[in-house]
Image (cartoon, helix red, strand yellow):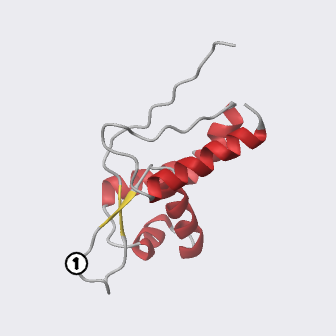
Amino acid sequence: MSDEAYGNHLNQLFEDIRAGKTTEKQKPKIIARTPDDVSKILTNERIRLLQVIREKKPESISELARLLNRSQSNVSNDVNYLEGIGLLEFEEKKDPVLHKKPVVNYDAVRITVDLSC
């Protein structure tokens, strides 16, 4: 897959998730062409972020940033990226004044490597 096709794939994935076109039955698929692509998507900090959300259940991005001892802007960027590719979601709040609560409702991320040429 060319760089352009790969970029188009990721852009389409973001659009489908934002438009609500993915369902529980049809989980988002992220195509990674190389191990480097996987490591760019799932950095150590992003994996740690997902683990902390799953285990500590922070009520907001600012609380998550404190738990991770990272800047709120960097955590916000990672959270928005991970939401965009379908690896986390935000809990709907009845009170719009309350901040967005990140949620991770799974225990593992499955990576499949296609070895066919």
Q: Is residue 66 left or right of residue 94?
A: right
Would you place residue 24 above or below residue 100 in this image?
A: above
Foreground residue among 98 and 3:
3
Question: Which residue is found at the position 59% from the left and 19% from the top?
Answer: 114
Foreground residue among 100 and 6:
6
Would you place residue 2 above or below residue 14 in this image?
A: above
Which residue is label 1 attached to?
A: 94
Would you place residue 6 above or below residue 101 in this image?
A: above
Q: Secondary structure at mark 1?
A: loop
Mark 1 belongs to which amino acid? Lys
Near mark 1 (Cα within 10 A), the count class, few <14, some 14-19 or many ≥20, is few
Direction bottom: furthest residue = 97
Instruction: Answer yes or no: is residue 78 visible.
Output: yes
Q: Position of residue 53 (x, y in %)?
A: 37, 58
Q: Is residue 69 left or right of residue 38?
A: left
Question: Which residue is found at the position 41% from the left and 54% from the top?
Answer: 88
Instruction: Answer yes or no: is residue 43 visible.
Output: no
Q: Position of residue 85 (x, y in %)?
A: 51, 50
